[in-house]
Amino acid sequence: MKGSNLIRWVGCAAGAVALSVTASGQSAVYKPPVPQGFVRIDADEMPTGTIFGDPSKPGMYITRNHFGPGQGSRPHYHDQDRYVTVIKGTWYVALGPEADTYNPDKMTPMKPGSFVFHPAFGHHYDGAKDEDVIVQIMGMGPVKTVNLEGGAGGGRRGGGAAPGGGQSGGRGDQ
C-alpha cells in the first residue's frame, strides 16, 4: 500500500511539472486580467513614448524617451520638475548655468540606473553619444519646454519643442 501511494504521489508531481512547462521549455506564467484602474506593462512590452498619463494635461505622467547615437537636445528648461532615470545606455547631461551654452565636451556621462532631477526652470541639455539610450521621465503635467536658443534651427534636434518630451521614433526630445 505504501508503494502505491508513493507511485501516485510521484505521478502527480510529474504531471504538475509537465503542466507547468510550455512546449518551448519555459515555465508558464499566470497573468490574470488587469483590473480596471491599474496598469501593468511587462518589460519586454514597454513602449517608448508616453506610458502613463499625459505630459500636456494635469496630473502625473511617465515617458520613456529614446535617443539614437548622436541625438540629443539643445539648451532648454521645463516649467515643472522632472525626474529622470537612465534605463539603457550612457546618457550625457549638462546641468545648471553652464548649460546655457551648448558644449558637448562638458557633458557628464550617466550610466544605466543613474538618476537626474531637473528642477522647474533648471537649464540643461542632454543626449546620446555613440549608442542607443533610453531614459524614463516622470513629472506633473502640464509641462512646457522652453528652448534657450532662438532663431531658425535653434531648439532641439529633430524639431521644435514638444510639451514634455515623450516622443518615440528616436528624436530624443527632452
Image (cartoon, grey):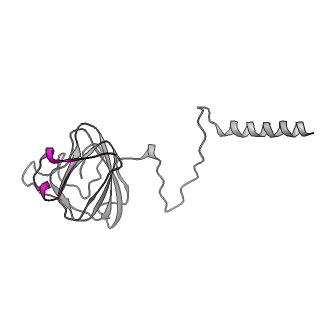
On the picture, is 24 further left or further right than 155?
right
Q: Position of residue 54 (x, y in %)?
A: 33, 60
Q: Residue drawn at (69%, 38%), measured in percent from left and top?
A: 17
Which residue extends farthest left? 151
On the picture, is 14 further left or further right than 161?
right
Which residue extends farthest top? 24
On the picture, is 6 further left or further right than 163?
right
Q: Position of residue 90 (x, y in %)?
A: 28, 43
Q: Position of residue 148 (x, y in %)?
A: 12, 57
How many callouts does the rendering have?
0
Which residue extends farthest right? 1
| Magenta stretch, residue numbers | 93-110
Q: Position of residue 24 (x, y in %)?
A: 58, 32
Q: Is residue 103 magenta?
A: yes
Q: Residue drawn at (32%, 62%), measured in percent from left and top?
A: 139
Which quadrant holds residue 10?
A: top right
**Quadrant (top left, top right, bottom left, bottom right) of the N terminus:** top right
